Amino acid sequence: MAVKTTTASLKKYELPPLPYAPDALEPYISKEQLALHHDKHHQAYVTGANADLEKLEKARQEGAEIDMKALLKELSFNIGGQVLHTFFWSNMAPAGSGGGGKPGGALADRIDQEWGSFDRFKAEFTKAAASVEGSGWAALAHCSMTDRLMIMQIEKHNNNVYPGFAILMVLDVWEHAYYVDYKNNRGQFIDAFWNVVNWDTVNRRLENL
Ligand code: MN
């Protein structure tokens, strides 16, 4: 049976603008690489998530059957892409102008508490990013049940995710994040990433938990 829906007034996903100019992260991430990543790859997840929502809405309006398993899998993938990329852009800043160096404040204390030193944390996060199988992410996350920081390795955009954990920082290690600048050398891209981490943003996310 068809149902009356009022989805026209409901929000859709939107591509957030980059919080800096596309050449702002050079030389670590080139303008070409960053613009392609944001304008094409990130946009594709936004478009995909909205298309999935439209499929759901259309089926509801027509009272039609939905292949829930397939559609929800696709939706989870696309929403994961939208959320993680949005985090990623904001946890970077131009080197020497908000990006790079070491964290301060509460984040520095938490990292020392958990890992003993920033260098140990950096080494573990680097290894997590380097060893993601196929396409995925490394993330720094917070567990509200234990009030501890943890590293999370995410395959694709949604596999291996700890449900309900707040994400504080992410690093995209899909090949599309670095192939223009570093070809297939993921390790070089991960090393470059540390020069553009916006620790203030990561700290703020921790403080706002
Ligand atoms: Mn990406």
Image (spheres, rainbow, N blue to C red):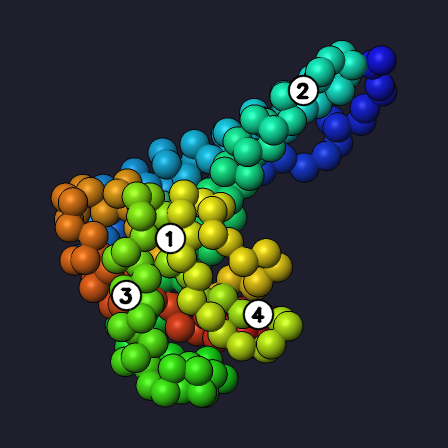
Q: Is residue 146 left or right of residue 18?
A: right
* Residue 82 visible: no
Disc with the residue nearer the chain's start (2 vs 3): 2
Residue holding disc 1: 137
Q: CA distance from mark 4 to mark 1?
A: 18 Å
Q: Is residue 68 left or right of residue 196?
A: right
Q: CA distance from mark 1 to mark 2?
A: 30 Å
Disc with the residue nearer the chain's start (2 vs 4): 2
Q: Which mark is residue 126?
A: 3
How packed mark 2 is, by other alpha carbons closer than 10 Å (few <14, some 14-19, many 20 or more), is some
Q: Residue at x 27, y 64 (%)?
A: 127
Q: Quadrant of residue 190?
A: bottom left
Front residue of this view, candidates 151 and 191 = 151
- In percent of width and height, residue 162 lies at 54, 58
Secondary structure of the residue carrying numbered label 1: strand
Q: Residue at x 16, y 58 (%)?
A: 188
Q: Is residue 109 left or right of residue 185?
A: right
Residue holding disc 4: 143
